[in-house]
Image (tube, rainbow, N blue to C red):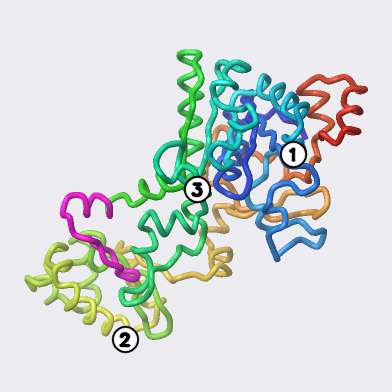
Amino acid sequence: MNATSTGLLNGVRVIDLTRVLAGPYCTMMLGDLGADVIKIEAPERGDDTRHWGPPFTESGESAYFLSANRNKRSMTLNLKSPNGIKILNDLIRKGDVLVDNFKTGTLERIGLSYDEIKTIKPDIIYCTITGYGYSGPYSHKPGYDFIAQALGGLMALTGPAEGEPTRVGVAITDIMTGIFSSNAILAALFARQQTGAGQRIDMSLLDSQVATLSYVASNFLISGEEPKRLGNGHPSIVPYQSFKARDQHIAFAAGNDYQWQKFCSAAGKPEWIEDEQFSTNSARVNNRDIIIPLLSELFLTRNAQEWIDLCDQNGIPAATINNITGVFSDPQVIARNRVYEIDHPTAGPIPQVASPMNFLTNPIETRFPPPLLGQHNDEILRDVLEYAGDLIDEYKLDGLV
């Protein structure tokens, strides 16, 4: 496969010093958009997630690693050696974007601060992804998604009203940080086209998590009231939560008063439309403790599919609560081709969840499956860095690559 692409970022080269999830998710998005992403990994071991499992494929590839590393080329490089740093500097000269998610200060200690890198590549876009950013009293601490969810307020909002604070079931703070980081990099690339200047981007898990508090943060900052856990309920919309139907739970959302009126009429409860306790969303929020038990009793009178059919017929949002098996057998997910296969050099055909970015004129393409460790050493040294064969052999003998 070729590093060139038909993608919108064809011609952009990303030097990827990231591992685990936030950074790799960011660089995978850039790779999906057509950038040439060169993933630098430690010799022999590589990205930690290569070893996170089970599950593994029959050939030993970690499912976790395979989830966040397509459209990248892997190069192993010993950054503890001066010559390893020299090779990396040569790569940076050939690159447009440098992304790392080492602990704050790690790269500075080996001569790779932004100021030092600017002397090598003045227009470099250098994005660091850390737990807490490069300033503040926590800047020296290691960062993990779970800890950011806890410190950033997400766990306090998640879980049953009377239960314990709960982590979201996927590493959502890592993923959102990856998305925010890729957005920042894209903006920096656009600005560089206008000005020729590079950028230093300082991203953190905690900053991203605080940003994703969104309207909950706004509610608190304006009212001063500490939000409470509501299980699957919503602080500002009622009804907007899960209910138990006769056979299984469903998600139900009457997002405005018109939808509420349509539901009440269709469900045989027209008196709720005129009742001052329930007639407006504000009234329903204030009388949550009255209307929710009434709705819970109502939903128990029919099977889930009956309620969903009724809601579909009246333009009211509702859905079954899918397990993961249900997600990937859902007709909408299938129709949108959310899963596809790509040939992996050792694992054979492997499934991938498709990028959510759908460009009808420049479709996302997968040029590289998630790479084997060091799979592209020779071609990067030869084709990107244009090293002579004897020098490549020397670096291999020295254990630098």
Of the pair 308 and 340, the residue shown nearer to us: 340
- Write the residue at 51% across / 50% down: 143
Q: Nearer the viewer, mark 2 or mark 3?
A: 3
The quarter of the picture where the N terminus appears is: top right
| Mark 3, residue position | 141
- Write the residue at 34% across / 69% down: 232
The image quadrant of residue 109 is: top right
- Amino acid type assigned to the residue bearing label 3 in the image: Lys
User: Disc 1 and disc 3: Cα gap in Å?
Assistant: 28 Å
Task: Point out which mark residue 301 bears.
Answer: 2
> Which span is picked out in magenta?
216-236
| Mark 1, residue position | 74
Q: Residues within 10 Å of mark 2 (few under 14, many from 20)?
A: some
Mark with earlier residue (2, 1): 1
Lateral position of residue 98 relative to residue 59, left or right: left
Q: Judge whether 173 appears above or below 388 on screen.
A: below
Lateral position of residue 324 relative to residue 281, left or right: right
Q: Does dot 1 land on a helix, a strand or a loop?
A: strand
Of the pair 364 and 32, the residue shown nearer to us: 32
- Amino acid type assigned to the residue bearing label 1 in the image: Ser
Q: Judge whether 4 appears above or below 169 on screen.
A: above
Q: Is residue 25 magenta?
A: no
User: Disc 2 and disc 3: Cα gap in Å?
Assistant: 53 Å
